[in-house]
Amino acid sequence: MSEIVFAIPGDLSLPTGGYAYDRRLLREWREMGVAARHLPLPGGFPNPSEAELSETGRALLAQSRDSVLLIDGLAYGAFPEGVAAGLAGRVVALVHHPLGLETGLTPAQATEFARRETAALRHASAVVVTSETTKRLLVADFSVPAGRIVVAEPGVDPAERAVGTDGQSVELLAVGSLVPRKGYDVLIAALHGLADKPWRLTIVGADDRAPETTTALKAQVAAGGLSGRITFAGALDQAGLDAAYAKADLFVMPSLFEGYGMVLTEALARGLPILCTTGGAAAETAPDEAALKVPPGDVAALRAGLARLLDDGRERLRRADAAWQAAETLPRWRGTATIVAEVCAKVVP
């Protein structure tokens, strides 16, 4: 293997968990001296045009035959089988979460994504996933042999413990782009029934990925009379995000499905108590001692969990201590990058 060619569609600078994972691999490899480079692919994935597919095929086939193609699943899972087959023997697929499990797809769209991703994965020499949950999904539903799958959980950087607020009002924090899968409509509906309790919510995340969802969420907040208590902060730089974590008292993740849930480990790293759903890998990413967990999409259960933690400062502190203790055992990015590099090194075109 001469180098790792990391093919990633779209704008790598976007503030999503998947792109953050990809950026960090590239950064760690530079520091480690691993021969790797970023190959940009068109931004239309996972719904590329024919022109974008042709451009992608040309770009990948132009790479040196002794390089390994590490292809982000946002693109690879959407490849027609003919494209995937033409690259067989030199591909490692990186699957953050299966494309067909994105919220908001029609049944026909979900079925087609699953069919296409299953076919493409047959031709990958190895598959890297970010959680044991995703590995189980690929084995059970996508016919990928367990022996071809390697788990490389996202790393996390050490951080200062959150200091929280003065206790007069509980500062809630949620982090993630405003897209349907994140379940913010469920969170807002749950909080609407708790208007008599002292809380404020800040939602940090890009608001331009699903404009109709952003518009609907803001309308929901206004209709519920919560405009003065819920802030949409948009995408923040690292300093702004660090500040948001530092002043939080409780981290909330209402997501319907997560391939891993990087924001959960970011919250653990800051010693924050967590209220999250059991959607996808989230059920396993946060330890039970640190996180109160409820079923995804269940407004009543989320409201009950919020009420419990808003009312019981001692439980919040107990879970915060458990989170801070768990932070010591979290994976680091250098280990993640090493795992993925070793997988690629075993694929010899």
Image: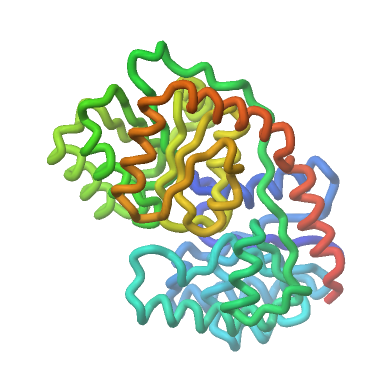
Residue at coordinates 52% horizontally, 82% vertically from top-left? 116
Give the total of numbered labels: 0
Compared to residue 60, the image places residue 322 above or below, namely: above
Residue at coordinates 67% horizontally, 56% vertically from top-left? 38
Instruction: Decide which of 294, 343 is in the foreground and name it.
Output: 294
Residue 8 found in image quarter: bottom right
Q: How is the image coloured?
A: rainbow
Residue 155 found in image quarter: top right
Compared to residue 33, the image places residue 127 above or below, namely: below
Image quadrant containing the C terminus: bottom right
Q: x%, y% of residue 246?
A: 51, 22
Residue at coordinates 55% horizontally, 34% vertically from top-left? 267
Residue with the most extreme bottom position: 82
Q: x%, y% of residue 253?
A: 44, 43
Q: Is residue 140 left or right of residue 349?
A: left
Q: x%, y% of residue 207?
A: 34, 45
Instruction: Decide which of 190, 60 is in the foreground and name it.
Output: 190
Q: x%, y% of residue 271?
A: 59, 27
Residue at coordinates 41% horizontally, 31% vertically from top-left? 309
Image quadrant containing the N terminus: bottom right
Instruction: Decide which of 348, 201 is in the foreground and name it.
Output: 201
Q: Is residue 58 visible?
A: yes
Q: Is residue 189 left or right of residue 36?
A: left
Q: Is residue 18 visible?
A: no
Residue with the most extreme top position: 166
